[in-house]
Image (cartoon, rainbow, N blue to C red):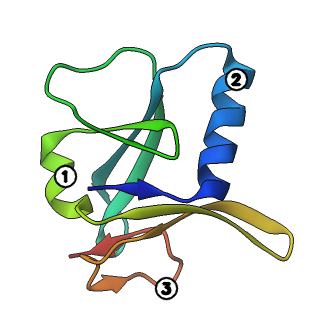
Amino acid sequence: MITITKQAAEKVSMQLHRRKKGLGIRIGVRTTGCSGLAYMLEYVDVVNQEDVSFVDQGIHIFVDPKSLVYLEGLEMDWVKNGLNEGFDFKNPNEKDRCGCGESFRV
């Protein structure tokens, strides 16, 4: 299961409303960076047949099956830290994260 905090859900909902389209978000991983994997986030306008879906805080979350093994138990949050703000991923499968925070390994 993948969950999303209230703050992240509000941000996603606002962005979907601003776009005036979208069924939800897709969370995935791609190979990149120092540690090997990076989170990928995109808006979903068309559901892929193979997508696994979750609904949390009223937001539809879609994940491709290949990414799901790395993301099981993930919580997506929206955080503000000084002048910086953005989505933060709390993943119980992470074993290490690179120094810049852009990639991780399991």
Camera-near label (2 vs 1) is 2
Task: Count residues near mark 2 (Cα–Cα under 10 Å), then give few for <14, some for 14-19, many for 20+.
Answer: few
Q: Give the image location of residue 82, x and y in percent.
A: 85, 77
- Does residue 18 sit above or below 66 in this rendering? above
For the residue marked with disc 1, what is the amino acid? Answer: Leu
Instruction: Return the residue nearer the eye: 30 or 4.
Output: 4
Earlier sequence position, callout 2 versus callout 1 = 2
For the residue marked with disc 2, what is the amino acid? Answer: His
For the residue marked with disc 3, what is the amino acid? Answer: Gly
Residue in view at x 28 percent, y 66 percent: 73
- Are dots 3 and 1 in contact, CB under 8 Å? no
Q: Give the image location of residue 88, x and y in percent.
A: 55, 66
Instruction: Return the residue nearer the eye: 52 or 65.
Output: 52
For mark 2, what is the residue? 17
Residue lying at the far front in this picture: please name it. Answer: 57
For mark 1, what is the residue? 68
- Does residue 36 sit above or below 65 in this rendering? below
Earlier sequence position, callout 3 versus callout 1 = 1
For mark 3, what is the residue? 99
Earlier sequence position, callout 2 versus callout 3 = 2
Q: CA distance from mark 2 to mark 1?
A: 27 Å
Classify the position of the N terminus by image quarter: bottom left
- Does residue 98 sit above or below 103 in this rendering? below
Residue in view at x 20 percent, y 50 percent: 67
46 with respect to 12 (left or right): left
19 with respect to 40 (left or right): right
